[in-house]
Amino acid sequence: MKTFILLVLFFLFLNTGFTQPIPTDSLYLSQTPPGYTPKIFVLPVNGTMRPVERIAITSDGKEIFFCEIDTYPANVQRVKCYKYLNNKWQGPFVVFEGYMDPALSVNDSVMYMETNVNTFATAYYSLRNSAGWSTPVRCLSTSQQTHYFQETNPKNYYMSATFPGLASKDLAYLQINGTDTTIKSLGKPINTNMDENDFFIARDESYIIHARSSSSVAGDLYISYKKVNGGWTNSKSLGPQVNLPSPTWEFGCYVTSDNKYLFFTRGGNAWASYYVYWVRIDNLIDSLKYTNFVPYLKNQISNQTDTVGNLFALTVPDSTFTDDDGNNTLTYTATLSGGGALPSWLNFNSGTKTFSGIPAALGSIDLKVTATDTANASAFCTFTLNVVDHTSIHTINKNILNEYKLFQNFPNPFNPSTVISYSLLNNGKVSLKIYNILGKEVTTLVNSFQKRGVYDITLNMNKLNLSSGFYYYTLTVNEINTNKVFKETKIMSYIK
């Protein structure tokens, strides 16, 4: 019986295809691993064909896939592979002609790649089979660019993509609802007005390393970390350990499954300068997570309109700036957009983040709000205050129907009556309430369904028997068909 069991186990051993792990000194084509200074990962150079862009390594380390191209944009592109067979590395073998940038699924059974024609990347996939790999099939039927397609442990899919109306490329993911698949941008701050193009996302989605570049600025590698709320932190440069000064480009990133080594492409103005490099990265991934994050502008302050002799008051919303170290680290200052002092009639309270004052003349004022953290890193937002007369603002109000908008009351300060105007982009349930300085509701002016349009509501304080002082008025709109909610608050001054 014992002999029988041993024979069964022996045949199971053979039939499962189990093989010994690759020896440590044979990993990575038997090349000596780097320290914390990048060095070239030696791959074959054939004439004008250079082994650049990203590589992919199977989980057992026995297959290393890479691509070679002839120039940018590529006229010739192919995927090649080294295999560890019979206790030695063999190859490279051509796996696919006409494709580049290989990536592997979590279990190594699917290869993602792309064709790159005239710099427009389209993602494809191939299934591993007994003959090697199946004929590549397009991942998505879309006119959007789908670049560096990748899969994570939670079975999510990420890529760099183009979006209508944007000149730059954004990092994105697939939002899958049944049979409906949509490419969704990861949004700010990981995406900027520059290209977020080549990238690597950790299998557990804890971080993304990505290239950032523009037509006038060479590319560098950055890292962003996944936040508890599902968003991404403001990206940090990998610094001089990885990024060299312009005109050198760093891109084509890939990190080994143990998060130990970063592979990337580096090159300058000459095509012959392009190579794949590798570097020890685990210390940098960990340490950058705990260094200061630079605050960033999350929501633009809209341009403002007010009238001569009317109290202007604007509080910078808490959602304007975000600091991934915590918004309590931020202090606020305000200047003219060029850095000059505010006009004498306009004050800015840095504690409450509030502008206040009575405009003395017609004209436009370009304002700048700066948020600075405890490490003296800062972000800013600029907007315009247009000062007009009452006739002009009333005309403006009547023609603004392309947005929800709550306007400053007129006159302001007032006694005893003032007019509050607002515009509705769509039909909805509308509420307009007045609150005292302590936040207690004192009256409701509107609480009804209203159609799209511009409305003027008169408030008469004589009917409320209230004392002089500052009051808030808040407009809340609940769209009927979408359940979207718009809410805006302004301050007014009542003087008996």
Image: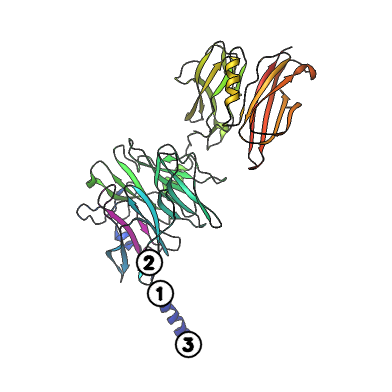
- Disc on res. 374: none
Q: How is the image coloured?
A: rainbow
Query: Answer yes or no: do the residues labelled 3 and 1 have beta carbons within 8 Å?
Result: no
Q: Secondary structure at mark 1?
A: loop
Q: Residue 176's spot in the image, x, y percent? A: 53, 54
Circle 2 — which element? loop
Provide the residue designation for mark 1.
17
Q: What range of the chain is rendered magenta?
A: 54-76
Q: Can you say whether 127 is above or below 143 in the image?
A: below
253 up-or-down from 494: above or below = below
Distance between mark 3 and mark 1 Cα atoms: 20 Å
Q: CA distance from mark 3 to mark 2?
A: 39 Å
Query: Residue farthest to the left?
Result: 47
Q: Amino acid at mark 1?
A: Gly
Q: Is residue 293 magenta?
A: no
The amino acid type of the residue labelled 2 equals: Ser
How many neighbours does mark 3 have within 10 angstroms: few (below 14), some (14-19), or many (20 or more)?
Answer: few
Q: Circle 3 is placed at which residue position? A: 4
The C terminus sits in image quarter: top right
Residue 58 colored magenta?
Answer: yes
Magenta segment's dominant SS is loop
Q: Which numbered mark, 3 or 2, is in the foreground of this view?
A: 2
Going from the N terminus, do you reach mark 2 or mark 1 first?
1
| Among the two numbered marks 3 and 1 on one chain, the one whose residue lies closer to the N terminus | 3
Nearest to the observer: residue 250 or residue 344: 344
Q: Which quarter of the picture shows residue 163?
A: top left
Could you tell me which residue is drawn at 60 percent across and 15 percent down? 390
Comparing labels 3 and 1, the label whose residue is closer to the camera = 1
- Kindly identify which residue carries mark 2: 134
| Kind of residue at disc 3 | Phe
